[in-house]
Amino acid sequence: MEGLGWFAAIIVGGLAGWIASMIMKADTGLFLNIILGIVGAIIANFLLGLLGFSASGTWIAQMIVGIIGACILIFLVRAIRGRSA
């Protein structure tokens, strides 16, 4: 999460992961919400960069990107688990 410090990234990541888990109706805990939000923001920022877009380093922009990325991660995990089960 460019432009945010570590503490802010954890807070924004936790909130983004929590909101994404509510949207996707996933049963995740606090630690996994933080991981989903931070990793999701990194992945979504990368994908947006490939498309020529850049999210600013503000909390709101990174929150939105983190939610989108976390939703993508939850979807991918469900798709992989569904195929292997």
Image (cartoon, rainbow, N blue to C red):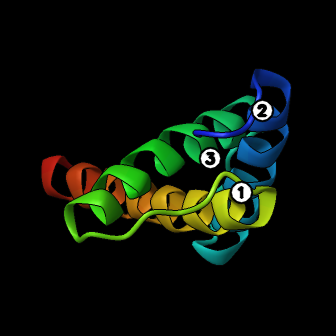
| x then y, percent, for residue 27 | 67, 54
In terms of sequence position, does the residue under pointer 2 or pointer 1 come before the other? 2
- Secondary structure at numbered mark 2: helix
Residue at image location 51% in from the left, 68% down from the top: 68
| x then y, percent, for residue 67 | 61, 64
Determine contact: label 3, label 1, CB under 8 Å.
yes
- Secondary structure at numbered mark 1: helix
Position of 65 with respect to 74 (left or right) is right
Look at mark 2 in the image and give the residue it sits on: 10
Determine contact: label 2, label 1, CB under 8 Å.
no
Look at mark 1 in the image and give the residue it sits on: 16
- Type of amino acid under label 3: Gly
The quadrant in which the N terminus is found is: top right
- Type of amino acid under label 1: Ala
Look at mark 3 in the image and give the residue it sits on: 37
| x then y, percent, for residue 42 | 45, 43
Residue at image location 35% in from the left, 58% down from the top: 78
In terms of sequence position, does the residue under pointer 3 or pointer 1 come before the other? 1
Q: Residue furthest bottom?
A: 23
- Measured along the vertical axis of the image, is residue 20 above or below residue 10? below
Determine contact: label 3, label 2, CB under 8 Å.
no
Alpha carbon of mark 2 to alpha carbon of mark 1: how far? 10 Å
Residue at image location 83% in from the left, 35% down from the top: 8
Residue 56 sits in which quadrant?
A: bottom right
Q: Which numbered disc covers residue 55?
A: none
- Type of amino acid under label 2: Ile
